[in-house]
Image (cartoon, helix red, strand yellow):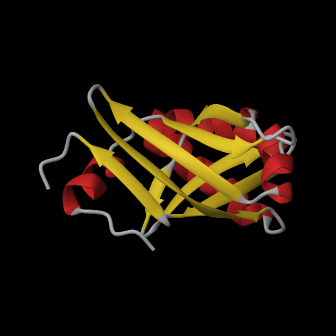
Amino acid sequence: MAELSPAVRAFLAEPRFCVFATIAPDGLPHLTVVWYELQGDEIMMNIGRKRAKFAYLRRDPRGSCCIEDGARYVTVGGPCTLQWADQEAAQADIKRLATRYDGPERAEEEAESQFRHEERVTIRLRIARVDARGFDD
């Protein structure tokens, strides 16, 4: 497991967008922008089960995330686990992310109008590799 410095942890704690990479069947990277939250030594994300990322991660569970802010960025990579059997937990995860990015009122609206109508998948990327630039420590 890779170690995150306090400065990198603080950076990742802020709600920035994450470019998440999986590996498509042809071997090329598949990149999408997703919400995330740092939870301990994992990056938690949540997607709809019908997304290509779900199929790609089931075939090859490796992923990578890049979170940037101008010249500062953090790239993390490692194995991913998928959790969708417990839809109550997966729905709670997407609502947590919606609250982080859009605030509690909008998150409640999104949960009602969109998320509860989808089968959701929580992705947990265990941080095995870190590349951070623009931090003093």
Above or below, 34 against 3 in this view is above
The residue located at (84%, 58%) in the rendering is 58
Residue situated furthest top in the rendering: 70
Which residue is at the front of the view, 14 or 30? Answer: 30
The residue located at (52%, 45%) in the rendering is 65
Residue 40 locus on image (x, y percent)? 42, 70
Residue situated furthest front in the rendering: 27
The residue located at (37%, 51%) in the rendering is 131
Q: Quadrant of residue 83?
A: bottom right
Residue 122 locus on image (x, y percent)? 69, 57
The residue located at (44%, 69%) in the rendering is 41
Q: Quadrant of residue 84?
A: bottom right
Residue 43 locus on image (x, y percent)? 51, 58
Report whether 97 appears left or right of 50: left
Report whether 108 appears left or right of 91: left
Judge whether residue 105 can be spotted in this image.
Answer: yes
Q: Quadrant of residue 115?
A: top right
